[in-house]
Image (spheres, rainbow, N blue to C red):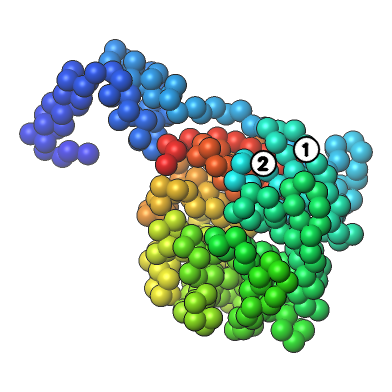
Amino acid sequence: MPTTRAAQREAQRAARCLTEVLPADALGLVLYQLTLAHEIAAVAPTNRAASIAARLALKARPFSGDVVTLLHGYPEQERSFVVKQEKGTVHCVAVAPDGRVITGSGEGTVKVWRDGVCERTIQVSDRGITAVVALPDGVRFITCSGVTATLCTLDGALERTFVVHRAHAHVVAALPDGVHFVVGLCYGWMDGGNDVQLYHIDGTLVHTFKGHASGVYALTVTRDGQHIISGSHDGKVKVWSVASQSLVSTCRGYNFSGGYVMAVAAMPDGKRILNAEYPGGIGVWQLDGTLERTFRDLHKDVVSAIVTMPDNQHALSGAGPGDPTIKLFDVNDGAVLRTFGHHGYPGAITSLALLPDGLRFVSGSYDNTARIAYHGLAPQ
């Protein structure tokens, strides 16, 4: 904000130039790129040119508060609270390249959704599905359940089962080459129960990354496929090199005496990573383990899901039952642009994923649903 009168006059002159010189369609394109374009339009600018431009920006950039609900479990009246939590909880969500949404629940089933309608239900396991990831080929996906990972097709065929270890396969992430994936193992009292394992989809175990002292509950891969990021109940985030199959760095948060990491994410440029900072914050790190900044009070409960936005400036985070909300925030200063509360109690957020249209995201929750909503940022 200009502080001197001269600066204020110059800012006013520049603003007049934008509305007087630029045609409405060009000004609309300017507004279209602004992070808060919808909020600007909502205040109904009295300047006629700005008002027309705002309407054009909204027409080009769809946004609404409408939410599409994908009911994976059972309606409220058909299940007790306890059984709902065990059976109907949507533990994980993923999105295929064609926009189909994949949800996995405590029932051991996976549902494939197209345009809000359940296209297929696949019984993958007799145990709960804890993680799911879509492969880049647009044909297959991988789930984790108990001591196994399963390779399935979106058409419903079960191609291969990987017995990963005696320990629990809790999380999974796919490499962009389309033929490799990694799983994170839990249960620290077992030998090898805290590892990260790299697999080829033909069933070959390529490498085991050892180093965590407790279960691995968060996992992601950088967009270039060069690094694996793992988060653990030991309170540490580790960066692993795929090429050298070695540890690159260890990130330790500010408040991890007995704390844990439930979520990690990589920025699109591959230079920074985000992790859940117990009890309700986000840490921003460089790949070499340097802490850039910490946002300590983003949520009022543990952050359980993070997904980064394509603009490399923003991210979405979801939290536990004490704060079952999703927040769109700036990774540079922690400013919260929007808060989404469409799950509600007992809707602790379990997972987040972006849809390929660049406009929407999907969230999984303890309320037995996945929900699709507009995030409101300009598509990249």
Quadrant containing the N terminus is: top left
Quadrant containing the C terminus is: top left
Q: CA distance from mark 2 to mark 1?
A: 9 Å
Q: How many marks?
A: 2
> Residue 82, position in %: x, y?
87, 51
Discs 2, 1 touching: Cβ within 8 Å: yes
Q: Which residue is mark 2?
A: 100
User: Crowding at label 1, few (<14), some or many (≥20) Cα neighbours within 10 Å?
Assistant: some
- Regarding residue 352, the answer to whether it shows in the image is no
For marks 2 and 1, the one nearer the N-term is 2
Q: Is residue 75 left or right of residue 364?
A: right
- Residue that extends furthest to the bottom in the rendered view of this protein: 191
Q: SS class of the residue under badge 1? A: strand
Residue drawn at 57 percent across, 29 percent down: 65
On screen, 322 above or below 338? below
Residue drawn at 62 percent across, 64 percent down: 179
Q: Quadrant of residue 53?
A: top left
Q: Which residue is mark 1?
A: 119
Residue drawn at 63 percent across, 56 percent down: 135
> Residue 285, position in %: x, y?
43, 67
User: Crowding at label 2, few (<14), some or many (≥20) Cα neighbours within 10 Å?
Assistant: many
Give the amino acid type for the residue marked by disc 1 in the picture: Glu
On screen, 226 above or below 5? below
Give the amino acid type for the residue marked by disc 2 in the picture: Arg
Residue drawn at 66 percent across, 72 percent down: 199
> Residue 111, position in %: x, y?
78, 45
Q: Closest to the observer: 279 or 29?
A: 29
